[in-house]
């Protein structure tokens, strides 16, 4: 079995962003109880035989977690799992929620990859997105991260905002590139069910950017960053070189094992998926009583695994290897999907990569609808 990744969901934010549907709370007074529960969950799920080569602190806003607490969590991981010496250890940090001293202490604690939630370098866009920081704070935290010794930095950006001009988005990209980040994640703004931003949209308080304009921005982003030498290895993700691809996120897309800790965190191993309850109080209470806070689990059927392997594999520029896919699921890609593959080639959505099934940049933009078309062929 491939080495596993560990994901720690730190569910605390100074304030909730109106577009975000990830589980988080603003009750930072609960942080000590949460950290005690998280340590207990690590002990309860210990597996010294399990090799681990990625650790990811996500959220929420993990940079609200004290650096000493991060160091303690990593020490527990080393005690209870086989953490490889060359492991990628990532922490998400938000401008306005981390200090220069924090960054220095996080680097000393063993965090070797920093993912900074910039989202935009334009103050008007940051206000619309409900972020707690401004352009100056975003620039400052990148500079402080470099000064703290981080040589593997990823920047998160969001585009496709209402009335966004191509020139505004290009300026964001150029500002990001001025720091020569090792990684860029460029996400299209999505309107998730039940979020304050979606309710505002439904109430007519703003008009979303036209779908055609979003598609143009997507393709322009891919073209521009490729011209700057960045590797567009996944729909939303770009690496300065292949060595800087997110090794942790690749586990999700490659169907490799991962364990999730914290409320709402998901895990996957050998065809089984399970998840923790999305409730901080129940999470803490359960572990205080030495019970795992599992919210449910499912054994993936063969058809589910085929569909997920397709959906996840087609997110990657390299797609998936046809021979290994056929061997794994005992089906012929040509016999099962041949008609659809011909259609996608005619539409300019299928890449010509010998031995692999992969999408072009145009195909990546329509990944969701193309995945549905594959599902209809099964």
Image (cartoon, helix red, strand yellow):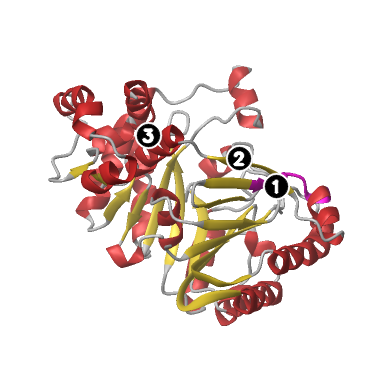
| Residue 165: image tag | 3
Span of residues in magenta = 275-281
Q: Residues within 10 Å of mark 3 (few under 14, many from 20)?
A: some
| Rendered location of residue 310, percent (x, y) | 35, 38
| Rendered location of residue 267, percent (x, y) | 58, 52
Label 3 vs 1, first from the N-terminus = 1
Label 3 vs 2, first from the N-terminus = 2
Q: Residues within 10 Å of mark 2 (few under 14, many from 20)?
A: many
Contact? badges 1 and 2 (CB < 8 Å): yes
332 drawn magenta: no
Contact? badges 3 and 1 (CB < 8 Å): no
* Residue at the disc numbered 2: 20
**For numbered disc 3, what is the local secondary structure?**
loop
Q: Residue at x 60, y 18 (%)?
A: 202
* Residue at the disc numbered 1: 24
**For numbered disc 1, what is the local secondary structure?**
loop
**For numbered disc 2, what is the local secondary structure?**
loop
280 drawn magenta: yes
Q: Residue at x 14, y 24 (%)?
A: 346
């Amino acid at each position: 079995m491939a080495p596993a990744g560990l994901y720690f969901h730190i569910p605390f934010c100074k304030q909730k962003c109106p577009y975000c549907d990830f589980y988080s709370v603003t009750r930072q007074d609960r942080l000590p109880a949460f950290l005690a529960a998280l340590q207990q969950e690590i002990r309860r799920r210990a597996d010294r035989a399990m090799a681990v080569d990625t650790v990811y602190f996500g959220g929420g806003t993990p940079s609200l977690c004290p650096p000493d607490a991060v160091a303690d969590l990593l020490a527990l991981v080393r005690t209870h799992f086989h953490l490889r010496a060359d492991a990628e250890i990532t922490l998400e940090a938000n401008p306005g929620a981390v200090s220069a001293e924090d960054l220095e202490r996080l680097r000393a604690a063993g965090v070797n990859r920093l993912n900074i939630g910039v989202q935009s370098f334009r103050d008007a866009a940051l206000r619309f997105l409900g972020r707690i920081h401004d352009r100056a704070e975003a620039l400052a935290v990148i500079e402080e991260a470099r000064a703290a010794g981080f040589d593997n930095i990823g920047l998160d950006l969001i585009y496709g905002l209402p009335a966004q001009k191509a020139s505004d988005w290009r300026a964001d990209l150029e500002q990001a590139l001025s720091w020569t980040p090792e990684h860029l994640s460029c996400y299209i703004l999505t309107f998730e069910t039940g979020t304050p931003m979606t309710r505002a949209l439904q109430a007519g308080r703003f008009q979303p950017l036209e779908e055609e304009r979003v598609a143009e921005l997507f393709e322009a982003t891919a073209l521009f960053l490729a011209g700057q030498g960045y590797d567009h290895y996944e729909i939303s993700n770009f690496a300065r070189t292949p060595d800087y691809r997110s090794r942790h996120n690749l586990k999700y897309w490659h169907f490799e094992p991962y364990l999730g800790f914290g409320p709402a965190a998901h895990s996957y191993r050998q065809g089984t998926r399970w998840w923790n309850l999305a409730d901080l109080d129940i999470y803490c209470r359960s572990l205080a009583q030495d019970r795992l806070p599992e919210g449910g689990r499912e054994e993936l059927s063969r058809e589910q695994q085929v569909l997920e392997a397709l959906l996840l594999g087609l997110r990657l520029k390299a797609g998936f290897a046809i021979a290994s896919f056929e061997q794994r699921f005992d089906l012929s890609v040509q016999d099962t999907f041949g008609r659809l593959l011909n259609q996608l080639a005619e539409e300019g959505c299928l890449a010509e990569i010998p031995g692999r099934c992969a999408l072009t940049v145009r195909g990546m933009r329509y990944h969701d609808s193309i995945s549905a078309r594959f599902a209809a062929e099964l």
